[in-house]
Image (cartoon, rainbow, N blue to C red):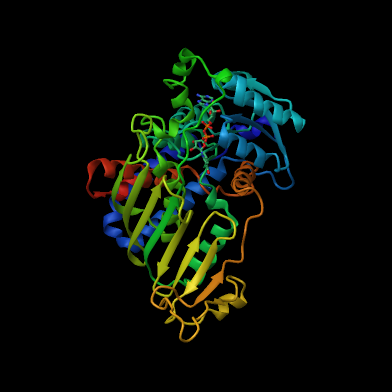
Amino acid sequence: MNDQKRTPKDSSTGEEKKKINRRDFLQGAATAPVLGLFGYALYKQQSYEKAQKAALLNSKPVPSGLSDINVALLGVGAQGDVLLNAMLKIPGLKFRAVCDIWTDFNLKKAVNLLGKYKHTVNAYEDYREMLDKEKGLDAVVIATPDFWHAQHTIDCLKAGLHVYCEKEMSNTLEGARKMVQARNETGKLLQIGHQRRSHPKYIHCYEKVIQETKMLGRIATVSGQWNRAVQPDIGWPEKYAMPTDRLKKFGFQNMHQFRNWRWYKGLGGGPIVDLGSHQIDIYSWYLGSNPISVMASGGTDYYEPKTHEWYDTAMVVYEYDTPQGRARAFYQTQTTNSANGYFECFMGDQGTLVISEAGGRGSAYREKSAPAWDEWVQKGYISAPKVLETPAAGSVALDVRETVPADEHKIPVELYDPYHKPHLENFFNAVRGNEKLNCPAEIGYETAVAVLKVNEAIEAGRKLTFDPKEFIL
Ligand SMILES: NC(=O)c1ccc[n+]([C@@H]2O[C@H](COP(=O)([O-])OP(=O)(O)OC[C@H]3O[C@@H](n4cnc5c(N)ncnc54)[C@H](O)[C@@H]3O)[C@@H](O)[C@H]2O)c1
């Protein structure tokens, strides 16, 4: 990919974008109360479309075929490694540079892995040096701890790169807001790593189950969870421990904090941010609206609070005003028991959708009183029903009729690639000008607004409301 493509010289300048955004904000602030629910949802849809168009305008389309993209990696720890392994399966990527402060360990591992795949890369400890020296880069994939996202993303955008940044977009809303502003000013693409947005099963359910057929009927309640078994703190090989002064230079007090940053205030956001943000993002997507209030109970009930500053348990209730009416959504994450793993469950008056990123988990259940779903089965949107067995006459049977609808229809779409590959492909295809981003900065921002308020609500110990303006930049 040539350098020209990285310079936005087309009709939509950064300044114009700033104007569009200010106008959007003023419009949003003024119109949300008078438009009513439907109008507001429509307005949100239109402003989303507008932002997508604006982002695309700045990426000059490559008419067809595959052009090489020069890529750098910033942060190659656990998730950087997952992303790198997925990217190695995507054609047309030329890895040029890798940056990580854990030079003797993670940086070395990533460089060695890339070497095995014949990518000769330059290795850096300091991302600013990488941006100074690497002049031919098109895009960067950022997987550093959350508190670095804003600075890394903004500096990379300003250096002319398209950015894929892992979730949580930032550990602060101020950071997330500045990231959107930098995206608007530079006209570069900014994809946030909520990878379910590109997952074929989630797209299928959104398009067919939720939007086209509305087979669940009126969705008034949602629930979801990510329950994780007890895990020991993350350790490190002693011989690769970094000296304290070097750690401090990068914002970590010691090796424990460096390895377990997600539990520390000011660095991460705890399980509700780490795990919950993926699923709360789906709540808003499928319900077609952002929450209007949140209340939550949580705490560090099990782990040592000195090393687990953020809550190991959070139980959350959101309220939404959706285009269909009021909906309430429960979400739970706890880290002491893995019962039932992770999933989201949308409950309508005609059916239920249970969906999870986990392979093989996805079903729609028809309420007995709902019209038949044969048409959707014939169209292949859902599989033919598996009728749940009726207990034999005379046996001691649990009466499931009230709690389990009779028919289970499997969702016939699965992902056989690594979980993150479709989202990365979407990003690189957008860089080539061939697709719209599935999770552009403004969507990541809205999710950050919804999710970061949970920790606030736990601290406040009461219901907090969202002003619709909070979601609009
Ligand atoms: N989308 C997902 O499903 C998913 C899953 C896991 C993690 N994540 C996200 O990925 C990011 C990384 O998480 P992780 O689990 O890999 O953490 P990690 O601690 O394993 O890795 C972070 C890496 O960043 C490096 N680093 C830290 N500060 C740096 C700096 N200033 N400059 C350069 N390198 C720096 C560290 O040395 C380390 O190698 C987080 O934002 C996390 O929320 C997303």
Q: Looking at the picture, tell me which residue is in the foreground, 168 or 10.
A: 168
Question: Which of the image's four quarters has the N terminus?
Answer: top right
Residue at image coords 54%, 34%: 143
Image check: 412 left or right of 322? right
Q: Is residue 42 visible?
A: no
Residue 406: where, in percent of width, then height?
A: 48, 78
Residue 433: where, in percent of width, then height?
A: 63, 45
Q: Looking at the picture, tell me which residue is in the foreground, 302 or 62.
A: 302
Residue 79: quarter of image: top right
Q: Is residue 241 above or below residue 65?
A: above
Residue at image coords 70%, 27%: 112
In this view, the residue farthest toward the front is 395
Residue 310: where, in percent of width, then height?
A: 35, 36
Q: Is residue 388 visible?
A: yes
Q: Looking at the picture, tell me which residue is in the foreground, 140 or 31.
A: 140
Q: What is the count of numbered marks?
A: 0
Residue 404: where, in percent of width, then height?
A: 44, 73
